Image: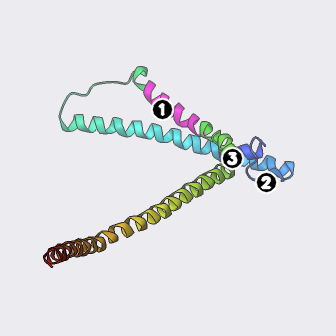
């Protein structure tokens, strides 16, 4: 109701239809929303009173069940918290009605904020995808080098064996060549 009240008073402009109404219709909407807001504030205030009455009744029931002598607390001093709760219950809907003012600026700036968040999330996603791509590229190089290890070791052993055989045959030819 507070939102409609502030719209009809042209304090906020969240609903263009309300702003474009003729003055007579807007005045009726203002009166209706003000009356509903007052009724809701009264209901909330009465709920605070009912809560206090229920707590008092429960306390007296517990005293009766415990068979303790009742304590008389009917002074005005005991009614202060209840009056404070009722006043706060009546004022709170009117205070909450003014939440529409920052709500309006939030709604108007929400498009920009969502756009910035989307751009930043896309940049973050691009970074993650680029990072994963580089990691796969580097992992492919590492796997290629790791694959070369089992192939190079037998080739190195083969070359070592050939070198040993070559040395043995060279020594044999040297010995046979000196005797002849």
Label 1 element class: helix
Q: Which quadrant is home to the C terminus?
A: bottom left
Q: Nearer the viewer, mark 2 or mark 3?
A: 3
Which badge, 1 or 2, comes first in the chain's sequence? 2
The alpha-carbon separation of the residues under discs 3 and 1 comes to: 36 Å
Q: Is residue 17 magenta?
A: no
Which badge, 2 or 3, comes first in the chain's sequence? 2
The way the protein has been coloured in the rendering is rainbow
- The vertical placement of 110 against 92, above or below, is below
Report which residue position mark 3 lands on: 109
On the image, the x and y values in percent for residue 65 come to 20, 39
Report which residue position mark 1 lands on: 85
Q: Residue at x 34, y 24 (%)?
A: 73
On the image, the x and y values in percent for residue 57 come to 33, 38
Secondary structure, magenta segment, majority class? helix
Report which residue position mark 2 lands on: 16
Q: Residue at x 28, y 35 (%)?
A: 60
């Amino acid at each position: 109701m507070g939102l409609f009240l502030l719209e009809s008073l042209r304090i906020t402009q969240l609903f263009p239809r309300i702003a474009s109404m003729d003055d007579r219709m807007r005045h009726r909407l203002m009166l209706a929303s003000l009356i509903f807001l007052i009724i809701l504030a009264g209901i909330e205030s009465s709920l605070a009173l009912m809560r206090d009455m229920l707590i008092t009744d429960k306390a007296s029931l517990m005293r009766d069940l415990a068979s303790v002598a009742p304590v008389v607390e009917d002074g005005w001093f005991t009614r202060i918290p209840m009056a404070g709760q009722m006043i706060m219950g009546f004022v709170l809907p009117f205070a909450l009605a003014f939440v529409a003012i920052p709500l309006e600026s939030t709604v108007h700036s929400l498009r920009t904020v969502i756009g910035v968040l989307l751009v930043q999330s896309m940049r973050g996603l691009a970074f993650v995808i680029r990072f994963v791509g580089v990691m796969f590229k580097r992992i492919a190089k590492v796997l290629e080098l790791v694959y070369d290890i089992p192939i190079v070791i037998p080739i190195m052993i083969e070359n070592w064996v050939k070198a040993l055989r070559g040395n043995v045959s060279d020594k044999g030819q040297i010995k046979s060549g000196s005797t002849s």
